[in-house]
Amino acid sequence: MTEALDQAAALITQADALVIAAGAGMGVDSGLPDFRGREGFWRAYPALGRAGLDFTTVASPRTFETDPRLAWGFYGHRLALYRRTQPHAGFALLMRWGQQRLHGAAVFTSNVDGQFQRAGFDEMLIHECHGSLHWLQCLRGCGQAPWPADELEPCVDEIECRWLGELPVCPGCGGLARPNLLMFGDWGWIATHYDAQERRLARWLTNVERPVVIEIGAGTAVPSVRHFGQHLLAQHAGRIIRINPREPTVAASLGVGLPIGALDALQALHERLD
Ligand SMILES: [Zn+2]
C-alpha cells in the first residue's frame, strides 16, 4: 500500500493537468448514500422499502406520471440533502493539487448532487454526464429549455416519502416539472446543458499533454465514468489513479489502484504531496 501511494503521488506530481472522474463512492465520506443494492436503497428510504419499490422504479419518468408526489418526495428529499451537505475535506485537497498543475483541474462525474460546484471547482470545467438535480425540465417536453432549481423549496413528508404542497411546474406550459437528470427508462431527458459542458471539457483537453485521471468511487456497475477515463488514457496517453475499495484493479502500465475509500486515499496522498 505504501508503495502504491508513493507511485500515485508521483503520477500527480508529473502531470500537467488533473482530471477527476467521480462516481457515487466520492460522496459517501460526505455522508451521502450510494444506493448500493436494493437493501442500501431501502435503508435510505424505508417508506419505499415498505412499498416494495426499488431505485429503478422510483427514479423513472413513468413514476412522475403515475405517482408524482412519490417521485417528487424522493427527489425533493435528495435535493434538500444535497443542498445542506458539506463536501468532505478531499474536495479541497483535489482543488489544491489542480491549482498546482499547469492546466488546472477538470471534473467528469456521474453524480447529480452538485458537490463539486459547491466545493468551489470551476463550473466551466465540470461535466455532469447524468445531469444534475439542481436543474429542472418539463416532463412532457413542451419545448421549454431546462431551468435552475434554485427557487424550488422542497417540502417533503420524509416518513412517507411524499411531496407536500404544490408540485413543481414548467414555466412554459404549466404542466409537471421533473429533475433535469437521466433516469431509468428515460427517453425525454434534455441534455443540452450537459452537452455544452462536454464540449468545454473537450476543448480544455486539447491543450493538455500529460493528464492524470484520479478516478474515485466509480464501480463497474455504472460504467460511464470508467469509460471516460479509459477514453482519456487512450487519447492523451494519460495515467490513472483508481481509488476504489472494492474494484481497484489497474494495468500496471496505465497507473495504480488504491483499495481504500475516497477521503482516506486523498488524505494519505496529501501527506506525500505537501
Ligand atoms: Zn412544459
Image (cartoon, grey):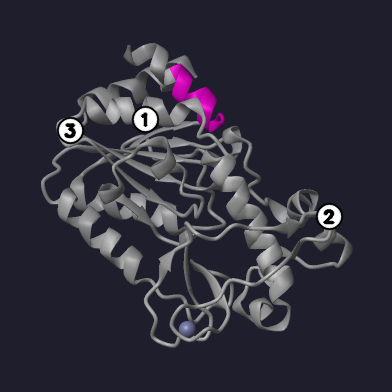
Q: CA distance from mark 2 to mark 1?
A: 37 Å
For mark 1, what is the residue? 94
Q: Residue at x 16, y 37 (%)?
A: 103
For mark 3, what is the residue? 16
- Please state which amino acid type lies under the numbered disc 3: Asp
For mark 2, what is the residue? 159
Image-based side of 102 in relation to 1, left or right: left
Residue 154, percent across and down?
63, 58
Q: Is residue 168 above or below residue 134?
A: below
Residue 26, percent across and down?
52, 40
Image-based side of 3 in relation to 154, left or right: left
Q: Which residues are magenta?
A: 259-268
Magenta-span inclusion, residue 261: yes
**Quarter of the picture holding the C terminus:** top left
- Please state which amino acid type lies under the numbered disc 2: Ile
Which secondary structure is most common in the magenta stretch? helix
| Sequence-earlier tag: 1 or 3 | 3
Q: CA distance from mark 1 to mark 3?
A: 14 Å
Residue 259, percent across and down?
54, 31
